[in-house]
Amino acid sequence: MSIMITAKDNEKIKYTKSLLKTKNRNKECKFIIEGYRILTLAIECSADLEYVFINEDFENKEEHIEFLNTLKEKNIKTYKTTNKIFNDLVDTESTQGILGVVKFTQKNIEENLSDKNRFVLILDRIQDPGNMGTIIRTADAAGIDAIIALKGCVDIYNPKVIRSTMGSIFDMKVIHTTQEEALRILKLKNFEIVSSYLDTNNFYNDVEYNYKTALVIGNEANGINDELVSQSDVLVKIPIYGKAESLNAAISSAILMYEIKKYQA
């Protein structure tokens, strides 16, 4: 049974709406997921789903009855509100009439990078939400052990990032730390630092990669910062056969991840 809320100044409404801002997500360690498919994945992945909001139309559809019953069985509190108020809670114009609030924990690199991990991804100031979400999704598909998002990256809990991950946000371990700490720990654990870099003669498919590899993907416009370049063990590039200056960061990361993965078998 859902709890009806019709006042836009209701505390639960205001609190949920506040999570559309990065500073509030970080303060509360919670983020919003929107849409029937991703809510279903959240439950399948045992995400820490705190509560759910639906609009007036959602529970009237027969195909949603079973899902609402699942929420009830799992004791996940469900609130219902008007279509107008619900639209103020979401980031998209075409809503499916359901959103959830999920709790997350900030991951410490020392506690979340084990000696068994062999392949990690380092992201240096990735700014585009679509790129970030696609990279997370691809890393999940490629079997990457962890993603290290350095300072300056877009918030991984940004609604656009969440949508682009297509549910991989629940499966992929994303660690936030400083560049200095990341390099210290990775070198201590004998990772080879491989950076995607245009100004090198090493083509990515001519290199033999280490058993333990940390792949660095840089900012869409400026690439990898100078300090990371100087700390890298190997610099590689993807050949450009046409007239394009470079490849999209998400595309580059996918090509390199799958090439390096061959050395992890």
Image (cartoon, rainbow, N blue to C red):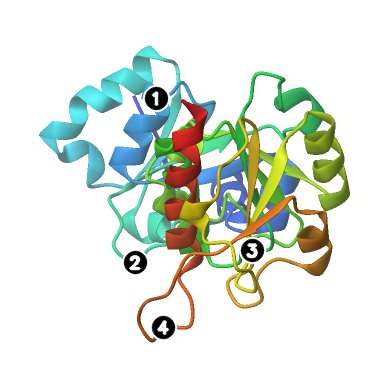
Sequence-wise, the earlier of marks 1 and 4 is 1
Mark 1 and mark 3 lie on one chain; the one further toward the N terminus is 1
- In the picture, the disc for residue 218 is 3
CA–CA distance between discs 2 and 3? 31 Å
Point out residue 15 in the picture as x, y percentages from the top left corner: 62, 48
Residue 166, percent across and down? 37, 45
Residue 3 x/y as whole percent: 41, 32
Mark 3 and mark 4: Cα distance apart in space = 18 Å
Q: CA distance from mark 1 to mark 3?
A: 33 Å
Q: Residue at x 69, y 32 (%)?
A: 105
Q: Are marks 2 and 1 in contact (CB under 8 Å)?
A: no
Residue type of the residue flagged with mark 4? Ala
Measured Cα–Cα span from mark 2 to mark 4: 33 Å
Nearer mark to the viewer, of 1 and 4: 4
Residue type for callout 1: Ile
* CA separation in Å, label 2 and label 1: 25 Å
State whether residue 146 is above or below residue 240: above
Lateral position of residue 205 relative to residue 29, left or right: left
**Which amino acid lies under the numbered mark 3 shown in the image of this protein?**
Gly
Tag of residue 93: 2
- Residue 88 visible to an observer of this rendering: no
Look at discs 2 and 1 and give the one toward the viewer. 1
Mark 2 or 4 closer to N-term? 2
Identify the residue at horizontal 40%, vertical 54% (top origin): 86
Q: Disc 4 designates what residue?
A: 244
Residue annotated with mark 1: 43
Badge 3 element = loop
Q: Secondary structure at mark 1?
A: helix
Query: Which numbered disc flags the more N-terminal residue, 2 or 1?
Result: 1
Whether label 2 touches label 4, CB < 8 Å: no
Secondary structure beneath disc 2? loop
**What residue sits 58% from the left and 62% below the top?**
202
